């Protein structure tokens, strides 16, 4: 199992490291006196357990634990403390265990066994996260099967599918039961709607059981919280790359374009869920911004690639003027006057049909200037 140690006292940190090393069941992947560095590493790596000192001057260990569990709800936390009276608070935070300094080998052995039991590790085995489950959220929801092919989950009802996709969109957040019954069963009285909700959640849990502990629906009096671990969403992978700020260069442009291919359709495109529309719109705008940046990079380097990028933008965002205008200017530079006219007419037609509007003044002014200077256009007309 992989562990990180956090303690502001170097001697205590080294002592715990030596004790764990003697047990031979724990791989220490990090130890920190600065809790902020511990948070950073835990957010970036797969970690099974954190041994955390409660009494630290910069950040109380109990407060730090709350932050860590917010990042990784399935993280195992073992508190290390010189004060036994912190035990109650530790377990209120759902800590796996706590040990009192100075830590004895016998007590540490029991603690590591608890971690192994929680992780489902048998004697002689090591902690293996297993192959992540990959979820496809673009176009149609699907799960990657063992053969690498995407396949649909067989839900018991359409309501079960919608409820799961809703809490998946809001993963890590509490979704109120009162909202769910109003959303899914508005025609029912509460006395009938709530049993429908409970039954549907039960069937969702049964359906998800094939994935082990990767999906956990936590229940409270007010609502549900979906926690996921070792699960990859294509929309998350795509967005993380898009917002990473990696500059467009000759060395990175192909990587950017490959990542853009992950977004091969709109978010949950095949489903008419009204609640998905704000997220769908947000992701569309992210795609548009990234696609325009890639097209603009090619603009002064490879006109044919720039044209291909702008044409794709026009196809996916037919009401966006910027791509049409860029195509008009590219075709004008290449002397392709027929294509300039075609792009302008496509833009004016769709804006008039959909919005009853004309193109922006900057486009119409450019168009009028281009007509005056283009003998080919005059000859065609």
Image (tube, rainbow, N blue to C red):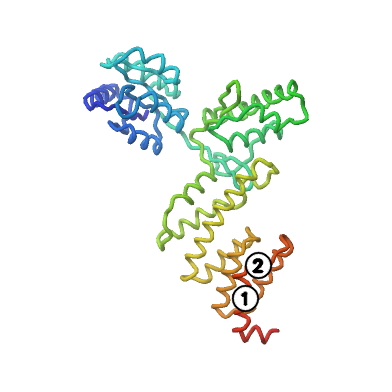
- Left of 245 or right of it: where is 316? right
Return the x and y of residue 294 as percentages of the image width and height.
50, 61
- Crowd class of label 1 (few under 14; some 14 to 19; many from 20; radius 10 Å): some
Q: Are marks 2 and 1 in contact (CB under 8 Å)?
A: yes
Label number found at residue 1: none
Q: Is 272 rendered above or below residue 100?
A: below
Q: What residue is rendered at 50% in x and 65% in y?
A: 296
Q: Which numbered disc covers residue 367?
A: 1
Tell me the CA gap for discs 2 and 1: 10 Å
Q: Which numbered disc flags the more N-terminal residue, 2 or 1?
A: 2
Residue on which the image places disc 2: 359
Residue at the (33%, 26%) spot, across then down: 26
Q: Considering the image in quadrants, where does the C terminus appear?
A: bottom right
Describe the element under mark 1 as helix, strand or loop: helix
Residue 3, image quadrant = top left
Instruction: Please identify the quadrant where the N terminus is shown.
Output: top left
Q: Write the residue at 72% across / 60% down.
A: 354
């Amino acid at each position: 199992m992989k562990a990180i140690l956090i303690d502001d006292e170097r001697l205590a940190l080294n002592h715990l490291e030596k004790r764990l090393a003697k047990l031979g069941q724990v791989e220490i992947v990090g130890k920190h006196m600065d809790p902020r560095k511990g948070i950073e590493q835990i957010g970036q790596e797969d970690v099974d357990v954190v041994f955390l000192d409660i009494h630290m001057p910069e950040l109380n260990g109990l407060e730090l634990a709350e932050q860590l569990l917010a990042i990784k709800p399935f993280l195992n936390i073992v508190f290390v403390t010189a004060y036994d009276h912190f035990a109650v608070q530790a377990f209120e935070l759902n800590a796996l265990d706590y040990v009192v300094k100075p830590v004895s080998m016998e007590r540490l052995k029991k603690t590591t066994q608890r971690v192994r039991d929680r992780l489902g590790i048998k004697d002689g085995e090591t902690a293996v996260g297993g192959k992540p489950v990959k979820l496809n959220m673009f176009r149609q929801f699907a799960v990657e099967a063992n053969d690498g092919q995407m396949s649909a989950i067989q839900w018991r009802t359409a309501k079960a599918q919608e409820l799961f996709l809703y809490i998946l969109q809001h993963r890590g957040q509490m979704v109120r039961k009162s909202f769910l019954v109003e959303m899914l069963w508005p025609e029912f009285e509460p006395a009938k709607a709530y049993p429908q909700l409970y039954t549907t959640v039960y069937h969702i849990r049964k359906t998800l059981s094939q994935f082990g502990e990767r999906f956990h629906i936590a229940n409270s009096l007010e609502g549900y919280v979906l926690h996921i671990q070792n699960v990859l969403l294509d929309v998350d992978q795509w967005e993380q790359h898009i917002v990473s700020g990696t500059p467009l260069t000759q060395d990175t442009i192909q990587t950017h374009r490959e990542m853009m291919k992950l977004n091969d359709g709109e978010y949950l495109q095949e489903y008419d869920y009204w609640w998905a529309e704000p997220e769908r719109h947000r992701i569309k705008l992210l795609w548009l911004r990234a696609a325009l940046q890639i097209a603009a990079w090619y603009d002064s380097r490879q006109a044919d690639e720039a044209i291909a990028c702008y044409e794709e933008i026009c196809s996916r965002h037919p009401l966006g003027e910027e791509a049409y205008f860029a195509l008009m200017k590219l075709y004008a530079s290449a002397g392709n006057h027929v294509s300039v006219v075609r792009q302008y007419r496509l833009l004016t037609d769709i804006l008039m049909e959909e919005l009853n509007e004309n193109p922006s003044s900057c486009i119409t002014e450019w168009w009028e200037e281009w007509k005056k200077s283009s003998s080919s256009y005059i000859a065609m007309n």
